[in-house]
Image (cartoon, coloured by chain):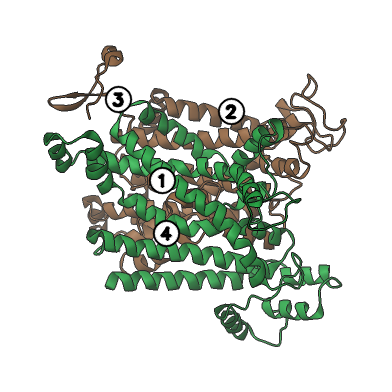
Amino acid sequence: MATVRTPAGASDTGPGQPAGPAGPAAAGLPLGGGGGGVTGARSMRRMGRAITANRKATVGVVLLALFIFVGLFPGLIAHDNPQAEIYPRSLGPSAQHWLGTTSFGQDMFAQVVWGTRPVLLIAFGVGILATVVAMLIGVAAAYLGGAWDGTLNVITDVLLVIPLFPLLIIIGSYLHGAGTAVMIAVIAATGWSYTARQLRSQALSLRTRDFLNAAKVRGERPLYIICVEIIPTMTSLLVAAFLTNALYAVLFSSSLQFIGLGNPNVTSWGTMLYWAENNEAFQTGLPLWIIVPGLCIVALGAAFALLNYAFDEIGNPALRPVKRMAITKAGAVPIPEKRRRLRVKRTG
Amino acid sequence: MRFVLRRTGFFLLTLWVALTLNFVLPRMMPGNPALAIIGKFKSGISPQAVKVLEEQFGIATHQNIVAQYFAYLGNTATLKFGVSLTTQPGASVGRIVLDAVPWTLGLVGVTTVLAFILGTGIGILAAWRRGGHLDSLMPPVFVIMTVIPYFWIGLVLILIFGVKLRLLPYFFSYSYSMTPGFNAAFIGNVAEHAILPAFTLLITTIGIWILTMRNTMITTLAEDYVRMARAKGLPAHRIMLDYAARNAILPNLTGFAMSLGFVVGGAILIEEVFNYQGVGYLLLQAVNNDDYPLMQALFLLITVAVLLAILLSDLATAILDPRTRGAG
């Protein structure tokens, strides 16, 4: 069961399922698992340099930082109460109302700005929670082995094949209007399995390494070995897992809110779309009500996805984009920068 | 043989988990959801339905939970899903579901086949002309496609082609003025209504086919037998299709088998956006109306379809590729 969630799974069960084999680090590649010899400050500096050098990473970081700023200080940017129905209804964009007003008379720009916070909370909440669960289960399965591994694996596999989005819909309907905290708990509880698999295979590859044997010989307890010896070597994979989970949280929660399964009184991008759709925003001449929150979801999702791809490329040079190739007798070689324009068409 | 047994065992286990989830979830939730709905619809639904509902959700406390559980399993095994509460009050859940299934199969099924064929073809070409325009355009497009909520693409297409250009219908699966029947006018009308949802589905699903095909094809192109074919001076299209693509298509084929299972669960949100009366639309209607029996039956249907498809694609892989039999 290597690639459970393949092609149509990517589209059909949910708004944005793990893209099967194509997803970053899908093969659980050991990304820079150098054995934990790098100290914190140095690895931070190295990471900083890597981020500025990689264009995807730069764009991702800038986008994410922008959203975090808006999410932290929405009051600095939009002065209106996003829920207050105090303006004329269905106004077009103007200097007072940059995006116009909703058909309830709320300022749309204020809604978009204030709507950032719940989405970020869900993204980071699910990202952290699901990654921690995935880490504990994946590493425990790999390290303990035997019956433990078998049991934890079956649990992971079962959760991996049950269609997540319908399951979330069912849970959401019993809950009647899930607030931010409930949303985080539900998505994290159902969504950790994909990353648990990746983390398990990484931990498996570490199991026979000498430094673990040394720890065992020293007589360390399993919990110590897992927390102090194994987990620090997986930092880059954990970051990737966090980014993957955060991205799915954004897409899942927005979709659930869009169909009215969130708390409709919380201002967020998903609930904006819900109210817009219910009030026929397109037909009543308020297309921005749907377009802008959607674009925000795409931009935030893109920030997580770009960072994820960038982390993969930084850790695994084989994944970096191919340079244009020229066919020579020796095989395909990258074309030097200047000659690109004159490139030889591949025969065939 | 052991492989087959193990996969079948896993299928049964997962099925049992899904069944149990259906049973346990409403009982786990704060405040019994069934009580709430009975309170809400007391006057609206028949005493019979109330009784059925009470049994289904364990309000009839005469039974302990174990007995309830086995009664539930028995009902499901004999396909007794009860009656709809609110969506079509009193109608049998099985009947309602069966009415919705063909619409989803038609829309999502045809689109899935189309996406598979087109995507595989484009993937072959992209790998063949590695580094060409198609190949270099794809990764960034793919990154963007994975972060767009699919329902939102549907909404934007509605805005462009439905509301602004008024080119295509975007509501329901045929015009209300039409009488369903097997004639050219009606079929044409249905086809016209399917264009926008099908196109939404197509552009959201095609990327993964392109990418898997391209990636396997690139590996295959480096094989010795492809070089051999080149050395023999075979025409390019034969090398591309008969030598490389034919050997690279396995992952896409098994993926295709699996994706057929996702046809039923369909494109829930796309059906919702286009008010297309398939399984996904029905599920959301049931959810909005608190129609729990209908909701549970639909969740089971969607899950069983997916699980069956995964089982079949596992078995197909084992038959087509002997190397996988040992793993598992």
Q: Which amino acid does label 4 sit on?
A: Ile
Indicate the quadrant where residue B29 lies: bottom right
Q: Look at the picture and state if A267 lies above or below A165.
A: above
Q: Find residue B37 and report its horizontal and vertical position in percent.
A: 77, 68
- Which residue is denoted by mark 4 in the rendering? A137
- Which residue is denoted by mark 1 in the rendering? B117
- Which residue is denoted by mark 2 in the rendering? A66
Q: What residue type is labelled 2?
A: Leu
Comes first in the chain, label 2 or label 4: 2
- Residue at screen point 78% across, 19% down: A95
Chain shown in green: B
- Residue at screen point 69% across, 73% down: B92
Lateral position of residue A257 relative to residue A214, left or right = right
Mark in the foreground, 4 or 1: 1
- Which residue is denoted by mark 3 in the rendering? A323
Q: Which amino acid does label 1 sit on?
A: Ile
Q: How far apart are marks 3 and 1 (CA)?
A: 29 Å
Q: Find residue B22 and report its horizontal and vertical position in percent.
A: 59, 70
| Pointer 3 local density, CA inside 10 Å: few below 14, some 14–19, many at least 20 | some
Q: Which amino acid does label 3 sit on?
A: Lys
Chain letter belonging to callout 4: A
SS label for mark 1: helix
**Contact between labelled residues 4 and 2, with CB atoms less than 8 Å apart:** no
Q: Distance between the residues labelled 2 and 4?
A: 34 Å
On the rendered image, what quadrant is the C terminus of chain A found in?
top left
Chain letter belonging to callout 2: A
Q: Distance between the residues labelled 4 and 1?
A: 39 Å
Mark in the foreground, 3 or 1: 1
